[in-house]
Image: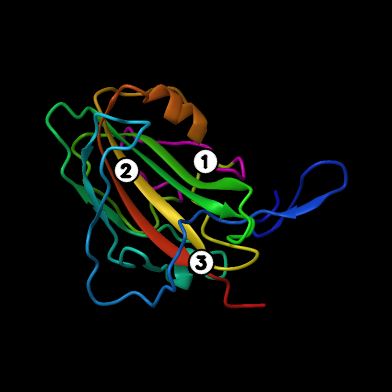
Amino acid sequence: MMDFGRWSFAGAGALVLVACHTDAAPPAGRSGATTPAATVTATPSNPGAAAMQIRSSAFAHQAEIPVKHTCEGGDVSPPLAWSGAPPGTKSFALIVDDPDAPDPAAPKRTWVHWVVYDLPPSATELAEGAGAGKLPEGAKAGLNDWKKPSYGGPCPPIGRHRYFHKIYALDTVLGGTDHTKTDVENAMRGHVLAQGELVGTYQKQKK
């Protein structure tokens, strides 16, 4: 299986670098002592959704993700915590992706780093390292773009990428196994009660 920031082929003999998800990132500093929650309002895909809060003790919103959670470190999933789920929540889904692949200056695709669904309604956090098969009981790991049911950390081939950590409160349990991001998004359409978003950034330190 190829690494990310790792090579992928597109078209006949055209070599393309695949990168990791992000938003137009401002210059990101190192994470500070505080980690304010990030909230997101309803989006066109979920027009009736309320806002939730999602945060990480490892990095602040729009700040740099520590090396530990990337391909240059241990590739350990960061700790995440969320709040603000409305009554009627029956499960949560989490998607982590990078819309800046392969190059933030000319993005061509969104790379999916982590998919988790059917998190129980009692869940309010994922501990550090949960992406290595340490999910709460009942939760399921979907397939990332390495076709693995686990977390894959930032590994951008060029530039600073944005990594979106998106939590969704659902009024249903999705069920099934080995869902991709597309599967989860299709299945939860019309079932999103609330959602939140935390953005971290990363640029490779080693050349």
Q: What residue type is labelled 2?
A: Ile
Question: What kind of secondary structure does the magenta stretch mostly adopt?
Answer: loop
The residue identified by callout 1 is 149
Q: Nearer the viewer, mark 2 or mark 3?
A: 2
The residues bearing labels 2 and 1 have C-alpha atoms spaced at a distance of 18 Å
**Badge 3 or badge 1: first in the primary sequence:** 3
Q: Are marks 2 and 3 in contact (CB under 8 Å)?
A: no
Q: What residue type is labelled 1?
A: Pro
Magenta region: 132-147
**In terms of secondary structure, where does tag 3 sit?**
loop
The residues bearing labels 2 and 3 have C-alpha atoms spaced at a distance of 24 Å
Residue 92 quadrant: top left
Marking on residue 167: 2
Residue neighbourhood size for the residue with mark 3, other residues' Cα within 10 Å, grouped as few (<14), some (14–19), many (≥20): few
Vertical comparison of 190 with 2: above or below: above
Q: Nearer the viewer, mark 2 or mark 1?
A: 2
Vertical comparison of 98 with 154: above or below: above
The residue identified by callout 3 is 74
**Badge 2 or badge 1: first in the primary sequence:** 1
